[in-house]
Every structure is written in structure tokens, then in C-alpha cells.
Amino acid sequence: MIDPLTVSRIMDAARIEEVVSDYVTLRRRGVNLIGLCPFHDEKTGSFTVSPAKGIFKCFGCGKGGNAVHFIMEYEQVSYYEALKLLAKKYNIEVQERELTDEEKNAQNDRESMFMLNDFARKFFTEQLYKTEEGQNIGMAYFRERGFRDDMIRKFQLGYCPERRDAFNKAALGAGYKTTYIEKTGLAYANDHGQMTDRFHGRVIFPVHTLSGKVVAFGGRILKKDNKIAKYVNSPESEIYHKSNELYGIFFAKQAIVKQDCCYLVEGYTDVISMHQAGIENVVASSGTSLTTGQIRLLHRFTENITILYDGDNAGIKASLRGIDMLLEEGLNIKVLLLPDGEDPDSFARKNNAADFIAYIQQHQVDFIRFKTNLLLQDAGNDPIKRSQLIQDIVRSISVIPSNIVRQVYIKDCSNLLDIDEKTLIHAINNLKIEKKEKDFQKQKSEEARQATAANETDKSNEKPAETIPDALQATTLTTASKFESIEREIIQTLVRHGEKELYVQPETGEPVSVGEYIIHELEMDGIVFNNPLYMQIIDEFKAHCHDEGFVAEKFYKFHINDKISQLAIDLIAEKYTLSKIHYKTGKKPTEIDQLHESVPRLIYDLKIQLIQEKQKQLTLLLKQAGQDREIIAHLMQLKKIEFQLSKAAGRL
């Protein structure tokens, strides 16, 4: 699909730190960069990017890889799609051949749905600009809202015709299947079995992923009809999970990083109007309560969030629980209450960026103080309500991970609520103890469930024990899972140093590389690793080690087989120490000196462990069979070999 030369150009151009920094805020730590992992919840960064090695690795969840792997994992796309995204980023032209019908059918559902969404985006835009209906209805609405042409194009706004099957027919005519039209929610079957466009007669707001791909749509009806919802959104699908998306994040991410702050609003038009006013570090939760996924998305770019409210007390109170989740993630939360009758959309249309930001700076307050004042208005002098208010505030403070920040808020609340600090601290400690107990019970329940599942698996995988005589007759010695550690170390050495010269053959004068030595030693004794991926790495080395310019680490790191590439990057990222050699001269050993000793020792250690395992098997058999001369002779032979290997390995 993409020729190897182009793939190589993309790999060479894609600097890991540039790719990752589009999604994650990184800060320098020594030769590496570090940030919050985008693939799991964490409050302290364990996500490391190594520009020198061209890889990323999270030491919290274990995920790692090169630039392509990062895009694949984050955007949930195929290897091919990830390459195309990187090619676009680095302005590399990709020459693609036309796919065969068989290859088209092999495209997975996710790719097909994204392709259909992109077709829909273009269809809705064309309807807005190129049809009389779109101009008279859709464009007239956007003009009425005060949106400029550049904003309409920037956010790729559109219009879906009033005719109930206009989009469906266009999509079918372009070759898209009904299956995907239904899966994306762009159309659905009505009560009579006819396909109906979900967004017919609505203006369209596309929802973009971090990389700019359209993942969903929002549609606003323009008719005044109380029986019809004002806004309709794409349903949940294989590619769209509303709890993980924020409207405007694609257009805001760079500004959020630059300003180290994000403004959080509610609706599509709020975001667009603020951009038009010159404030770009803004995203919308699109009318939903904040979720963990959305919070994680924001936390990758900043720790400072300002939430803009329009003064609707009922709406504010409904969102307070979600904001507690922000506190729990260690974010710094401030709240801005706009003047009566204003929302971010209307306020942005009346003010430029400088005035809007100045107003925010003057009127925003920290969330705990805001929440306390808000609830105090309701509680008044009612002692029961005040008690509930205190419990509510204490619960919010208790989730804050920073001890220092908690202490500051305790002091503030003590003054605001006229309560002794010790009382607040005691209540907070009780809540923290309760949470720890709940977490502990949850963990124990999960461990018990996993143990039960593992026992069932072990029972189902039980096999008849292989007889020792059969094992003795085997010509190939396959390692068991108990040798995984040393197997991995050997493969790690091959990946890191495979092409490096280990020694020169005295007879021929030909150099022997680290990888060639390892493979020769394994094959000489018929040793086959239990892990099939390790064997595939060995086979790949044999096939390509004599290619011009072959470097093992680079070859495996960018291997087209994702499993090999992923394993190689894990091995590269893992701590690796060559054996230390001490010379009487006190001269510091070179890397080759260390390899010369450590690589053979690794092989000797593996062989010794295999022989010791064989001896255990024979000893058990001897107890069952009595004084069998053949078994005794074989045991003695193995002990002799073990002695020779131990001596060669420097153990004796």
C-alpha cells in the first residue's frame, strides 16, 4: 500500500519528541523528556520519551514504542493509517496504489467509519456553501450568530438538507455500505424500515479527535418545535465515545500548552465565539458532565482549568460532582461566573480577547471557595443544611492529592465556615480512611477473581506428562517458560548489539557478530526458545544480518510486524547492563571487551540451566525406575558437561 522507501522516509522524519508533544506536555529530565502518560491515569509523570533512541516508554502501564506505535495506540488506527498521519505531518507525499476489492473488504470497521465520517463532513460543507437551501437556512443561522467565514471554515461547519434521506442516498451512491452508515449513526432505519438521516434539517458541528479526524457530529435544529430536541449528537460507536472527547480540543491544544491554561465551557457555539474573539485555549464538554476520560485528555496539556458558567445555579450545581473529579486528578480549578444574562458565546461576541481575559483574571475564584459560597447561599441559617454543606466541602477537599493544597483549603474553609481547623482535618482523615478501605476491598475482590480465573485456566491446560525416555530421544531442546528471564536477556543482547563484531575467526579471518555467535551456539545444541516471538526475531536476524547497512536495533525497532517492533522497543527501553570486567592494568573496558565476556557467559548460563533441569527430570525417573544403568550413565554425562560449562562461564 505504501512503498518501503516512503515508509523509510517517514520513519526517518518522524522525531518521537515532536510527535508525542502534539498530544502530551513534555518537560526535560536529563537526556530524556517526561510527562503524564496518555494511556492510563497517573498524577506523577512516568511517561518517558527518549529522542536519542526514538522511542517512548511508560514505566507505569508498560506501553512503549516508536512514533508509529504512539499514533496507533493513541488514535486507535492501523499501522498504515498511522504512517499516513505522520506523512501528512511531515509533508511527505505518499504514493498509493488502488486497492483491490479484496483489500477494500479487508479494511477494518474503524477505518471504514472514519472514511465515512470524512465523506459526511465534505457533504455537509458542500450543502452549506453550494446549495440554495444551505445558504438560505444554514448559512443564515451562522451569520445570525455572528460567525465569520474564517471561523465557519476553520471548524468545518455544515448543513444537512431537510429531505430525510439526502445524505443516505449520497453515501450509498459513493459506495459506502448501509452497515457503516448505521454504525456511525449518520442515518437509522425508521419504523417503516426506511433509512432516515439523523441530522436532516440541522446545521452541523463536526467533533474532531486530537489529530483532527472527524469522530462524530452535533446537529442543531433551526425550527421552533418543543417536541424535537434542539441538539442531536452522534450515538456511541466503535470510534466515538463521548466520555473521551472534548469539542474543540484539536484547535485548542497548542494554545492550551502555550498559555498553560484551559477554559472549559459547555457548548459548540461558546468555543467558536471565543476563538473568534481571539481566545483559542478553550474546549467544551458538549453539555455532558465531566468524565475521567475528558479530564485525562485535559491533564495532558495543562494543570490549570478555568470553568466558565453563565449564572444558571441549577446547571452549576449539577456539574459540581464532575469538578470534584478534576480536583482528585491534582488539577488547579478556578471558576468564573459571567454577568447575568451572559454566556461565553454572547460575552465573547461583545468583548475582544484582551477584555475577556482581563475580566476572567479579575473575577475568577478557586473552586473550593466558589463552591462554599454557592452552597452557603442555600444553607442560610439552617443547621441541617449547613452540616450537609460542610460534609460536601470536606469531601471535595479530601480528594485533593497534594497535602500542601489541602492545608491551604482547610484554612480557607475554616474561616469561611467558622469551624475549627482540627474538626475539618479529622473529618477529612476519616473520609480518606474510608476510601482506602473501599479501595483495599475492591483490590482483594479483583485479586480473588483473577486467582479463580487462573486456576480454571491451569486446569483446562493440563496435559499428560511427557515421559523422560521420549524427551531423551528428542533432537530439539525446547526451553520452558521458567527460562523466560534468560531467554529475554539473550534476545535483548541480540536486538541491542546483534550486528557488532564479537571476534574474528582465526582460520578464515572472517568477523563473527554477536548475533551470529548467539544463533550458532543455540543451533549447535538444538536449543529452541519457548517464546515464538523470540524465535521469529532470530529468524529475521538470519535473513537480514548481511543486508547493507544492517543495524539490529533500528531494524527491529521499525519492523513492519508490530509485535516484533513493540517487543524490540520494550527491550531497548529496559535497563541493560553489560558485565563489568576488571583488569590489573586498571584500564576501563570498552563495550566490545564487555560483550566478549558477557555474551558467551549468557549462552553458558542458559545451557547450564537447561542441563540442570534435565538432571532433575532424570533424577525423578531414577527414583521410579530403580538403578537403571542407562539413566545413571546419562546423568553422569550431564554432570560432566555442566562442570565444563561452569568452568567456561567462570563459575569455577
Image (spheres, rainbow, N blue to C red):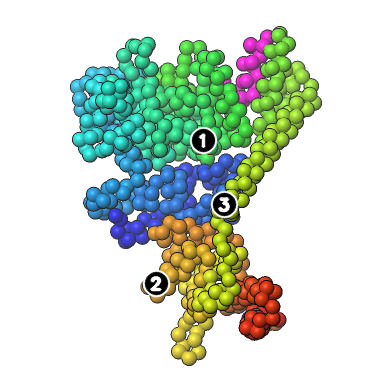
Of marks 1 and 2, which one's residue comes earlier in the chain?
1
Whether residue 351 is visible here, answered yes or no, is no
Q: Is residue 201 left or right of residue 651?
A: left
- The percent position of residue 650, horizontal first and vertical second, equals 67, 80
Q: Measure the C-alpha gap from mark 1 to mark 3.
A: 33 Å
The three-letter code of the residue at mark 2 reads: Ala
Give the extent of the magenta segment.
359-380
Residue 429 among magenta residues = no
- The nearer-to-camera label among 1 and 2 is 2
Please give the residue where the numbered disc 2 appears in the rendered image: 543
Please give the residue where the numbered disc 1 appears in the rendered image: 293
Q: Measure the C-alpha gap from mark 3 to mark 2.
A: 37 Å
- The nearer-to-camera label among 1 and 3 is 3
Q: Which image quadrant: the N terminus?
A: bottom left
Q: Is residue 403 left or right of residue 138?
A: right
The disc at residue 457 is 3
The three-letter code of the residue at mark 3 reads: Thr
> Label 2 near label 3: C-beta < 8 Å?
no
- Nearer to me, 226 or 409: 226
